[in-house]
Structures are given as C-alpha cells and as structure tokens.
Image (cartoon, rainbow, N blue to C red):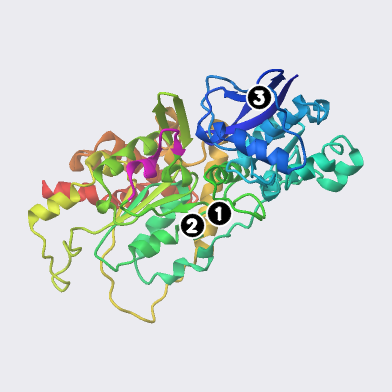
Amino acid sequence: MYVKLLSASVLGVEGRFIEVEVDICSGLPQVSVVGLPDSAVRESVERVRAAIKNGGMKFPMDRITINLAPADLRKEGSAFDLAIAAGILCASGQVDPALLEQTLFIGELALNGSVRNVPGVLPMTELARSAGVRRVIVPEDAVEEARLITGVEVFGIRSLAQWTGGLVDSLDSDASRSETIGPAPERFGPAMDTPDGELDLADVIGQAQGKRALMIAASAMHNILFVGPPGTGKTMLCRRLPTIMPPLSGSESLMVTKIVSVSGKLGNGREGLIRRRPFRSPHHSISMAGLIGGGSIPKPGEVTLAHHGILFLDELAEFSRASLEALRQPIEDREVTIGRARGVCRFPARFLLAASMNPCPCGFAGGSPDDRPCTCSPLAIARYRARMSGPLADRLDLQVELPRQPVRLKERSSLSSEEARSLITEASERQQSRYAKYGIRWNSELQGSLLHTYAAAMMAADAEQLLHLVYEQLGLSYRAHDRILKVSRTIADLAGRETIRSEDVAEAVSYRCLDKNIEEAG
C-alpha cells in the first residue's frame, strides 16, 4: 500500500515542505530510505522500528520503501521520524490515512516511542500556515513555540502510544479540537526580556560625545566604532545599546524568533515572540564560519543571529583579519550567501555593528602628556591598526574617540535609557513613515535615488558646501561621503527637522576619527 504524508525541514532560516512517501509490498523484510538522506535520516529506520514496537504497535515484516521528496534536495536531521512512523502505520493499515490529510508532522522519535523536540519548529509551522495546511503535530515540548503562529491548529504529543491511543480518532472532532487546542492569538513577549534589563545609560559617567553617538547609531542602525584607552567606557556604552533601541516590529519579531528557533536556542515555555533586539558578542577567537555562517550543510553564524539587532565586536583588532574582511559583504548586502555543491543558502544579516578597540597594543597612544605614556613602537602601532582594513573602516558610519575621563564620583548622567529610547523611537517612527512604500525602515538603508531624494536634495546650501569641502580635504571615498550624508539625515531626524543643516553635517564629520587620523598622518 502507498501513503504520502507531509513533513518539513529548514533551508537557511525558512521552512520547506518534505513529502514522505511510504510504499509497503510483499517481499523480503527490508527498509530502504531514498531521496538524498544524511546519516541521521538513514538511522531513523532503527529509531522508528523500535518506537513502533515499544509503543504497542506492529512493525510490518515486508519490503518498505521510503522516499523523501523532492529527491534532489539533501535531507538532514531527525525531524522526519514522526512522519515516517505515521506513514508506515498508515501503509500497513493500522491507521486510517484519510484522517491525516492536511497534517504536517514534525518530531524525533526515541526508542521507547516518546517524541522529542527538534530545532526549527517555528519556521516549519509558519510554512504550514502560509500553505494552508490545516494542522501541525509536534512534540509536546514544542507546542508553545508552534502556537506562536496563528491560523493553524497545533497538536502536541508525548509518544506514539498516546497518538494512536486516541488522538488520531479525535483529529476531526470539533469538540475535541476546542478542548485540545483552540487557535492561539498572536503573542509577543515583553519588550525588555533579557537579563541585561537592569543596565542603564545613566550608569556611564561622562563621555557625552560617546552617548550622543550611541543615540545616533540606535536611531537608524548606523555602524559604530569606539576607539580609546582601556577603561574609558567603550564596552559599557555598547552593552547599553539594547536598552535604548525601540522594540522589534511584528514582522521583525517573527523573523528574529525564527532564527533563534532554527539555531535550537529558543527554549521551552516561551511567552511570546521576541520583542527585544538581539545582542550578540562573540569572542575574538571565533572562526570565520562561526561569525559569518557555514558548514557542509550551511548553518547561520553570529551575523544572522544578530539580525535586526546588534553585533558587538569587543577588541576589534584582536579578531582575525579574514573574519573582519568577511564582514564587508554582509554589511553592504544585509544578507549572507553561502554556496555549496549541494545548493546555495541565504541568511538574513541586517545588523548594527558596534565595535571597540584600543588605539595601539598597549592602549595608550595619542593620550595627553599627563596620561600614561605609550610603550609601543611606531611599527607596532601601524601593524595593530592595519588589522582593520580601509574598506572595512569605510563601512563604519560613526568612528568615535573616547578620551580618558577625570574622576568625579558624584557626577552622573542626566539621560537615562528610557529617556534616550523615547527620543530614538520618535526618530525611528519618522523614518518608518517616510520610507513605508519603499520596503526599508532606516536611514542607513538609503542608497541610489532614495539617498538623493531624502538626504542630498534636502540639504541646505551651506550644508552641501561643507560636505563637499570635507570630501576634498580629507580625501574621502564616495562610500564615506554617502555615510556622512546618511548620518546627517539621522541627526536631523533626531532634532525633528526635514532639512539637513550645516551643523548636522559638521557633527556627522566629527564622528570620522579614523579618516581624520589618516589625514593627519598624511
């Protein structure tokens, strides 16, 4: 007998349907799995065999052929176990296949018949909703995650025995359905739902310019770099970025939650979709594949886990040059494309890059005469700074020097994270309204004709002259010119103005310390 059921896998961060076809015919007892399965899928035969027997059902002693379609797509993982077991039970006449139409099966089987959770339940459930699939059967531990998607019925099961012992017969029962699941409303978690919620911008003493630059960066997702000696507050400022940024929108929340689900880090008991922008801070020893993504079967890296949030690289110059150079393409294209012989995966990577570094290996170059003297040779300083290439520095919108602060124990910032977030949210909403019909949200995403229309064409005459003068005197690239223009647009938005004034351009230029250092060195 032939039966076809529906399962799913994850390609990149999106779900993809996999049809599980099971055919049982007379012949020598044998189970064949075809359709480009990996080792975990081939081993599912033994898991399914033991699960069916230990669940009180009969595993057919016939020739069984299992095909996973489409046959040209590599299948990996254990999420097909439940669909394969259901297909065998249906094809052998132990379950009526008519009851399982329009049903998506997701789950791994243990040898005793219990159903285990798998990564990526959320994007697979969203795929079912978009395709009009009626119901989804998932492990009990994944029910809360699956119910974050509205418009599809979700059944959670603990074991095969529970499923065949009554759940199958109840799938078409309206009364049972209302008692068992009920459609879940769209749920969002709290806007500030991470352990860093106690951090506040007011904790940072002094560094007014650094705080101002941080607000500009948060207002439009501008990349930012802090340069200064040890202990000046570079890391403190960057770690407070999530506390001043507006919460994720509905579509952003869904995408961020899907990425966390695919990475297997969503956890049980999730109260709703993630609202707080992600903050990722990898160690400088991370590999390029860990930062960008990769593997024989591509997996998302830190730039994707930071999608719609912040990627913080502390001690930027300590990262390998290859890893830093690999960031150039994701910063520009806002996605990562990883090609393998088996196919191409695209991962989203719209993140705010926040970084910090010392001016030299010892950290004290360029200080005042009263500061601790630098012990590095000119060659050591040149090698240290060369770890970050000019093209990468060009892509950093804000480059801010943080000087050593005098000790004033009673001095405290008057601007809290909540107050800063209120101002930033207003500027963010202004941008969102302006670019609604273009499919972008931030000034940092402006390019081409949009950059001319909403930035260059809105400059006052003196502001335009100042930008041209700076471009010539500092020998800037045109990319740096455009980024100064975008930052000027954001500064005007923070002030509630449509016109870009000369003071906006002057402030944007003041946040290009690396360009000024190059000019001084020349």
Task: Answer whether residue 335 is visible to the viewer in this image.
Answer: yes
Q: Is residue 343 above or below residue 135?
A: above
- Between 80 and 407, which is closer to the camera in this rendering? 80
Quote the CA–CA distance across marks 3 and 1.
54 Å
Q: Residues within 10 Å of mark 3 (few under 14, many from 20)?
A: few
Disc 2: which residue? 242
Name the amino acid, label 3: Pro
Q: Position of residue 179 (x, y in %)?
A: 87, 47
Question: Can you identify the residue that label 1 sits on?
Answer: 276
Residue at 13% over, 50% down: 382
Whole-Å distance between the Cαs marked 2 and 1? Answer: 7 Å
Query: In terms of sequence position, does the residue under pointer 2 or pointer 1 come before the other?
Result: 2
Give the quadrant of residue 458. top left
Bounds of the magenta segment: 286-299
Q: Are marks 2 and 1 in contact (CB under 8 Å)?
A: yes
Q: Residue at x 63, y 24 (%)?
A: 30
- The image quarter containing residue 270 is bottom right
